[in-house]
Amino acid sequence: MNRLLLATAFLMSTLSVACAQQQQQPGKPEETEVYQPVPPVVVPGKTAADPPADALVLFGGQNLDQWVSADNRAAPAQWTVAGGILTVKKDQGNIETKRSFGSYQLHLEWRIPASISGTGQARGNSGVFLASTGKGDLGYELQIVDAYQNPTYVNGMAGSLYKQAVPLANPARRPGEWQTYDVIWTAPVFGASGALVSPAYATVLFNGVLVQHHQALTGPTLYIGKPSYGPAHGPLPIKLQAHGDKSEPLSFRNIWVRELSATK
Ligand code: MG
């Protein structure tokens, strides 16, 4: 019996050595090392919140030179710039970037005033339209609204892709504190016939916490009804929302973008 066990153990160890030898690839490690193309040097910001050297600063605290009125692109953006921060002027409507973008990396910071009033969606509502498909609230909205102990429908809370994707977590800070969004936006791709080839995707970190993970969108976000992709579009502006609720207006600072695909 012992002999049989020994023989079995010997056979098994011989087989495992043979298998390991079979898995070993012939050749040298250098054969799988890649040296070209060398990634470009990008001097980073002092912190992860500061713009890297190759970023386009959309709002650096001084002016709204990079922005226009979303409902009248010939008119300048009329929100308030003071003390290095940008504050929504609700009666001036949405603002959007002069430039259009395809896929990109975006950083922005927002702060709901400590004195905020209202409840649910009427408490510090704004939003970032990751691509503005037209006037008003047309586009793909990453929601901004107070999410600190402020219940509302979860597919419309801060960190949601409005009425399409519930955030994976709620890392909201209390009103009065600055909050960050870091977004990777993958623009939708349309074929020559105008048919959708690949949907839009968004990855979102909210205060450094992953809340959307390469989430596909089913079309521009809608307040009412089921979203779907309409006419084909190329690069589009990024838009900030002046929501019509009666609560105190919120502020933004430190907005920058790095294009990941060329603007057409
Ligand atoms: Mg909103």
Image: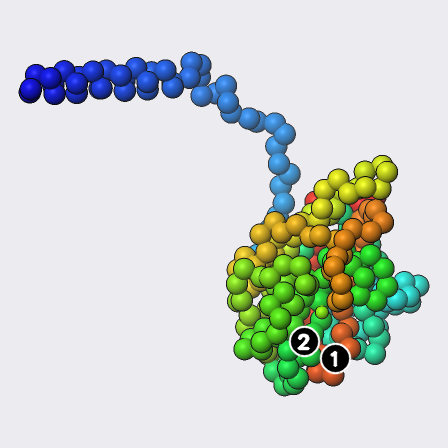
Q: Earlier in the sequence, mark 1 or mark 2?
A: 2
The quarter of the picture where the C terminus appears is: top right
Q: Is residue 183 left or right of residue 5?
A: right
Give how far across and how far down residue 32 sits, in percent.
50, 22
Q: Is residue 210 visible?
A: yes
Q: Amino acid at mark 2?
A: Gln
Q: Quadrant of residue 145?
A: bottom right
Q: Which residue has dot 2 on it? A: 121
Find residue 245 and name its label: 1
- Which of these two is toward me, 183 or 252? 183
Q: Residue at x 57, y 27 (%)?
A: 35
Q: Dot 2: within a 10 Å radius of its alpha carbon, few (fewer than 14), some, or many (20 or more) residues?
A: many
For the residues bearing labels 1 and 2, Cβ distance under 8 angstroms: yes
Q: Is residue 83 visible?
A: no
- Which of these two is toward me, 251 or 236? 236
In which of the image's four quarters is ligand 1 placed? bottom right
Give how far across and how far down residue 98 sits, in percent.
84, 58
Residue 38 vertical placement versus 42 (above, below): above
Give how far across and how far down residue 53 sits, in percent.
67, 50
- Which of these two is toward me, 237 or 158? 158
Residue 193 vertical placement versus 25 (above, below): below
Q: Amino acid at mark 1?
A: Asp
Alpha carbon separation for disc pair 1 and 2: 8 Å
The quarter of the picture where the N terminus appears is: top left
Q: Residue at x 44, y 14 (%)?
A: 27
Residue 52 vertical placement versus 127 (above, below): above
Mark 2 vs ligand 1: CB below 8 Å: yes
Give how far across and how far down residue 33 sits, in percent.
51, 25
